[in-house]
Image (spheres, helix red, strand yellow):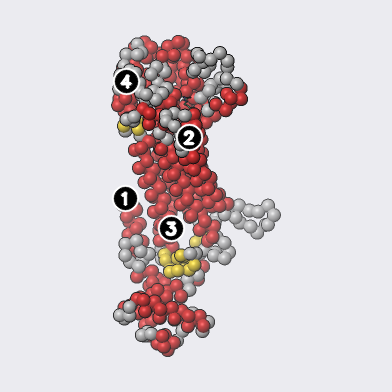
């Protein structure tokens, strides 16, 4: 049974049928389809389309269909073109011809957009919880890090010493924005298209606001043409997922780097590492590499949907059927990555001595310039004099703190206290502004995060 046979004399070609059918994808919205249908039955009952008896029978039947889905007992038939057809077909098996009244005033165009939005509204909190797991892992690591120092990098070149805690938290803030974006997106998802019909609106006095309320939508769409074709929320959702994946890949990339023998800052637990079938010594960070790799896949899903949407004539076009698979795939990917990343991050063993050992005293050259600034040397000149000191140490094949005082004094107005500049923790604690790397600033970050 299709929902549209009347004007046709031939049945759809088998291959065309297979291409057209969306059931393998949209059956994931089964519960939402039933819920939307129950609410629609209520609305057209109130509008006088369904008698009390028909309404009761449809509601009861849909309730049974819902239970069948929830318990995994629903049986799809090869003739079910999509989830909407499957639900209506089953309803008619259960209650007979009255089922045929349910679709009055409704189109699969407003129906599918409603199902999809409902599904997303119910999925966002799930994603949110998964993000929270990762947030706590990062905060936990930041708290454990205490006063551990590490080199901070720009251009992946050693730049200035920082606290490891500051580094962990830098990833927290990025991933917190992702959750904020999800929350912000919710208000654009929470707009009810049902009641827009195929494109022009419903011909009965359906109370769309009551409908929205019963389904948990914050508002109703204001233009039926826009409502049946608007997939901004899906594109935006994919952007939010992609942005999060980019953040995760950045974190993953650094974990991969930090676990190399060359860096040796981190060690992964065996539970989150894999071996090589050939090289017995290998311990590979696959979990992190996959996270990095999947960011590419997610960006592909976003650009895929954007390309599908580009240039579509209004209103509903079957191209729009391509909207759900990328959203489902992005969701599954993130829901797979986030808990594993959270667990894997928690088990990382930090090597503070390796991190401290990677801080060489030239990384305090900025502090050396600041030292001169404190002696009233203009920063431009101080920068140049500190640069000369770096060069002198290089030429003498000595560390900055090994260069004799005379050598410093030959360069600029340095005094015996100059050597204090080369303590990384001193350098770190000087960066005490809001958002700086000092111990105090990092403590403040943590209390701000926890207080929220
Ligand atoms: N399977 C379709 C989709 O996902 C449902 C809407 C079908 N509408 C139609 N006019 N054929 O978009």
Residue with the mark numbered 2: 323
Of residues 122 and 385, the one drawn nearer to the viewer in this rendering: 385
Q: Is residue 298 left or right of residue 219?
A: right
Label 2 or label 3, whichever lies nearer to me, is 2
Q: Is residue 318 left or right of residue 368?
A: right
Residues packed near mark 3 inside 10 Å, few (<14), some (14 to 19) or many (20 plus): some
Count of marks overlaid on the render: 4
- Label whose residue precedes the other's in the sequence (4 or 3): 3
- Label whose residue precedes the other's in the sequence (1 or 2): 2
- Label whose residue precedes the other's in the sequence (1 or 3): 3
Q: Is residue 313 above or below residue 160?
A: above
Residue lying at 57% horizontally and 54% vertically, measured from the top left:
285
Residues packed near mark 4 inside 10 Å, few (<14), some (14 to 19) or many (20 plus): many
Residue with the mark numbered 3: 168
Residue lying at 36% horizontally and 85% vertically, measured from the top left:
413
Q: Residue furthest right?
A: 278
Q: Are the two marked residues, 4 and 2, in contact with CB atoms closer than 8 angstroms?
A: no
Residue lying at 58% horizontally and 52% vertically, measured from the top left:
286
Of residues 272 and 430, the one drawn nearer to the viewer in this rendering: 430
Residue with the mark numbered 1: 452
Per the model, the C-alpha gap separating discs 4 and 1 is 42 Å
Q: Is residue 372 above or below residue 329?
A: below
Per the model, the C-alpha gap separating discs 4 and 2 is 28 Å
Q: Is residue 45 visible?
A: yes
**Percent x, y of residue 231:** 42, 35
Label 3 SS: helix
**Percent x, y of residue 121:** 39, 35
Residue lying at 38% horizontally and 12% vertically, measured from the top left:
54
Residue with the mark numbered 4: 206
Residues packed near mark 1 inside 10 Å, few (<14), some (14 to 19) or many (20 plus): few
Find out if the beta carbon at label 2 lies less than 8 Å from the nearest ligand 1 atom: yes
Dividing the picture into quarters, in which one does residue 237 lie?
top left
């Amino acid at each position: 049974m299709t929902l549209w046979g009347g004007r046709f004399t031939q049945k759809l070609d088998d291959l065309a049928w297979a291409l057209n059918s969306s059931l393998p994808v949209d059956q994931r919205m089964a519960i939402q389809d039933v819920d939307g249908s129950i609410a629609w039955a209520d609305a057209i009952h109130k509008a006088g389309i369904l008698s009390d008896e028909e309404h009761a029978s449809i509601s009861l039947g849909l309730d049974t269909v819902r239970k069948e889905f929830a318990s995994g007992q629903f049986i799809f038939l090869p003739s079910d073109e999509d989830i909407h057809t499957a639900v209506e077909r089953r309803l008619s098996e259960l209650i007979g011809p009255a089922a045929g009244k349910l679709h009055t005033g409704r189109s699969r165009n407003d129906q599918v957009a409603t199902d999809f939005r409902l599904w997303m509204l119910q999925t966002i909190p799930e994603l949110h919880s998964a993000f929270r797991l990762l947030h706590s892992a990062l905060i936990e690591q930041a708290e454990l890090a205490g006063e551990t120092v590490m080199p901070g990098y720009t251009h992946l070149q050693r730049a200035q010493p920082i606290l490891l805690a500051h580094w962990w938290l830098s990833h927290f803030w990025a991933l917190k924005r992702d959750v904020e974006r999800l929350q912000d997106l919710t208000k654009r998802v929470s707009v009810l298209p049902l009641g827009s019909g195929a494109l022009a609106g419903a011909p009965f006095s359906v109370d769309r606001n009551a409908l929205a309320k019963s389904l948990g939508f914050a508002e109703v769409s204001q233009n039926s043409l826009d409502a049946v074709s608007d997939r901004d929320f899906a594109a935006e959702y994919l952007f939010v997922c992609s942005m999060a994946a980019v953040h995760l890949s950045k974190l993953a990339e650094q974990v991969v780097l930090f676990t190399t023998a060359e860096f040796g800052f981190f060690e992964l637990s065996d539970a989150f590492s894999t071996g090589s079938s050939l090289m017995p010594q290998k311990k590979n960070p696959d979990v992190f590499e996959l996270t990095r790799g999947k960011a590419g896949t997610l960006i592909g899903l976003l650009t895929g949907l954007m390309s599908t949407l580009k240039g579509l004539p209004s209103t509903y076009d079957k191209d729009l059927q391509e909207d759900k698979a990328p959203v489902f795939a992005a969701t599954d990917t993130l829901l797979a990555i986030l808990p594993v990343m959270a667990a894997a991050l928690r088990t990382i063993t930090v090597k503070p001595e390796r991190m401290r050992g990677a801080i060489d005293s030239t990384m305090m050259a900025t502090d050396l310039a600041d030292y001169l600034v404190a002696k009233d040397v203009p920063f431009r000149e101080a920068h140049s004099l500190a640069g000369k000191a770096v060069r002198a140490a290089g030429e003498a094949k000595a560390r900055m703190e090994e260069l004799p005082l005379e050598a410093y004094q030959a360069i600029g107005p340095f005094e015996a206290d100059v050597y204090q500049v080369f303590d990384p923790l001193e350098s770190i604690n000087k960066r005490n502004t809001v958002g700086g790397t000092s111990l105090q600033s990092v403590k403040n970050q943590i209390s701000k995060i926890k207080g929220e």
